[in-house]
Image (spheres, rainbow, N blue to C red):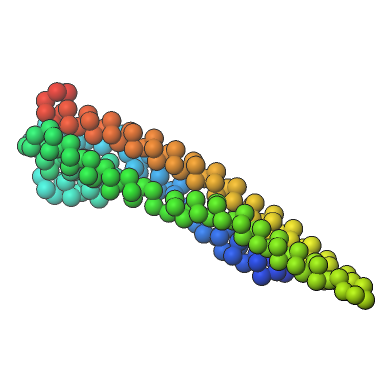
Amino acid sequence: MWNIIQAAGWPIWPLLIASVVTLAIIGERLFSLRASMVAPKTLLPEVQEWLKKGGVSKDVCTRLEQHSPLGQIFASALRNEKASREVMKEAIEETGRAVSHDLERYLNTLGTIATISPLLGLLGTVIGMVELFGAFTATGHDVAQFARGISVALYNTAMGIVVAVPSMIFYRHFRGRINGLIVEMEQEAIKLVEILHGERK
């Protein structure tokens, strides 16, 4: 591996850093965007049980906020339990926007890496070509410099693609997962509003 890095030259370093950042984001988002952590199925039945036992206190709302993103939405609804449906809906929408923004954390970075990695690879290619043409002189050519120019050009091009492809795949994957989780949380919030207003048992 070290031989490849040496053959690729200094342009490979930004791509290596981008690859480490990409792996870190992918690992963190795979862990954080699990349905059981974002929108657990058991939360609404638990809230229903609390309501049947005499309502939800401020302490319970605080615990709900710390429980999960869906818990944050439920807490905003329960804090406006005695308000009109419109006020409760506005509170849920405000919290929902904040939750949605939190779920999208680091995705812009991942998308940026997916976009610029091929360009960084292209930069390495151009630098390699410059070295390659620099090998030719009036008296002949330097074989070692010629070979190094080819190495720099090809390794950086390949590395740019290697970093960009998984970055884009996971960027799209996380976008789709977030959209699905948001829809799921909206449905759960609607059910809670209907329960609080006596429209659902």
Q: Nearer the viewer, residue 3 or 133?
A: 133
Q: Is residue 3 visible?
A: no
Q: Nearer the viewer, residue 66 or 177?
A: 177
Residue 139 place in picture, x, y as percent: 93, 76
Residue furthest right in the image: 139
Residue 110 place in picture, x, y as percent: 49, 52
Residue 158 place in picture, x, y as percent: 69, 54
Residue 151, by quadrant, is: bottom right
Residue 197, by quadrant, is: top left
Relative vertical location of residue 200 with respect to residue 119 in this rendering, above or below = above
Residue drawn where x is 70% and y is 62% of the image:
126
33 displayed left or right of 99: right
Residue 125 place in picture, x, y as percent: 71, 60
Q: Is residue 138 visible?
A: yes
Q: Nearer the viewer, residue 181 or 37?
A: 181
81 displayed left or right of 129: left
Residue drawn where x is 16% and y is 46% of the image:
61
Residue furthest bottom in the image: 139
Relative vertical location of residue 178 with respect to residue 14 in this rendering, above or below = above
Q: Nearer the viewer, residue 14 or 55?
A: 14
